[in-house]
Image (tube, grey):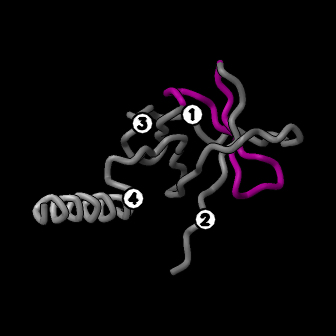
Amino acid sequence: MKKVGIYILIFFCTLAIGGCKKSEVSASSSYAGILMFKGETYVWRDVQEDIQLGEQVLAVLGKVDIQEAPQEGQSNFLNKGTPVYAVENQENMLSAIDANGQYLLVKKEEKSK
């Protein structure tokens, strides 16, 4: 009977330890909704109705797999050739327009350490 109690204790300890495991972002994390432009990372956000497009600053150079980090001029959600525009009076924003609609891209801020 004592052995059964020890096995039950071990079982519950294993469950407790397994339940406390911290989730971490791995190298296989998704890079969804990213465009690289002039060495900066821009991420997809909802379009604001009142944005004014400026001049075209880029035609997307290539589309990479969603699990890859795009390089300069590439995106992992915009197709090759998609026009990208500056947004008037918003230095940290770009906008892209394709057959699916308009996308707002906001420059990703560096996290301070």
Instruction: Return the disc, 1 or 4, that comes first in the chain's sequence.
Output: 4
Q: Residues within 10 Å of mark 1 (few under 14, many from 20)?
A: some
Say which amino acid is labelled 4.
Ser
Q: Which residue is mark 4?
A: 23
Q: CA distance from mark 1 to mark 4?
A: 37 Å
Q: Which mark is residue 109?
A: 2
Instruction: Return the disc, 2 or 4, that comes first in the chain's sequence.
Output: 4
Residue at 45 percent of width and 48 percent of height: 72
| Magenta residue check for 94 | yes
Span shown in magenta: 78-99
Mark 1 element type: strand
Instruction: Return the disc, 4 or 3, that comes first in the chain's sequence.
Output: 4
Q: CA distance from mark 1 to mark 2?
A: 23 Å
Say which amino acid is labelled 2.
Glu
Question: Residue 59 appears at what percent x and percent y?
Answer: 57, 33
Q: Pointers 4 and 3 in contact (CB under 8 A)?
A: no
Q: Which mark is residue 66?
A: 3
Q: Nearer the viewer, mark 1 or mark 4?
A: 4
- Judge by depth and name the residue closer to the eye, 21 or 98: 21
Classify the position of the N terminus by image quarter: bottom left
Say which amino acid is labelled 1.
Ala
Residue at 37 percent of width and 40 percent of height: 67
Q: CA distance from mark 1 to mark 3?
A: 19 Å
**Number of disc labels:** 4
Q: Which residue is mark 1?
A: 59
